[in-house]
Image (cartoon, rainbow, N blue to C red):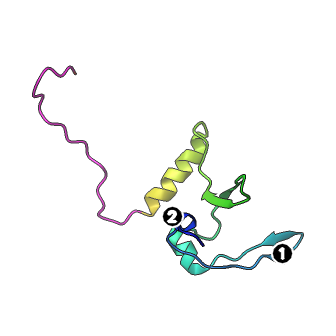
Amino acid sequence: MNKEQKKGLIYMTTATVRKWGNSLAIRLPVEVTKLVNFEEGIELDIFVSENKEIVLRPTFPAADDQEALRAHFLALRAKCKSGMRNHEEVFAKPMGDEIF
């Protein structure tokens, strides 16, 4: 692996492609799943670049799918630790010619 290929790389391992029914599958090592916060059942978008590189990203709801967005929000909120505060905006008093 040359210097350019290592750019942005934080972890590297190998996996073997195996037959699973009529498909092919790979098993992700637990170290990888922890690094990227993948859990069982997560849906992924799969991208293939012009260089035939594969990129996996968690699927996010479309901006106009309000039910899916709400479910996503509630799932994220459920992961919050108790005692966490929500973000609060802090505004300073106007100091010049600001218009509100």
- The chief SS type of the magenta part is loop
Question: As rendered, which of 6 and 44 lies closer to the eye?
Answer: 6
Mark carried by residue 88: none
Residue 96 picture location, percent across and down: 11, 24
Above/below status of 60 relative to 6: above
Quarter of the rendering occupied by the C terminus: top left
Report if the CB atoms under discs 2 and 1 are less than 8 Å apart: no
Q: Amino acid at mark 2?
A: Lys
Q: Secondary structure at mark 2?
A: loop
Could you tell me which residue is drawn at 64 percent across and 60 percent down? Answer: 56
The answer to whether 28 appears left or right of 9 in the picture is right
Mark carried by residue 20: 1
Q: Amino acid at mark 1?
A: Trp
Question: As rendered, which of 94 and 48 lies closer to the eye?
Answer: 48
Query: To which residue does mark 2 refer?
Result: 7
Magenta region:
80-99
- The reply to whether the magenta stretch includes residue 81 is yes
- The reply to whether the magenta stretch includes residue 45 is no
Could you tell me which residue is drawn at 26 percent across and 46 percent down? Answer: 88
Which quarter of the figure has residue 2?
bottom right
Residue 77 picture location, percent across and down: 44, 57
Residue 12 picture location, percent across and down: 57, 76
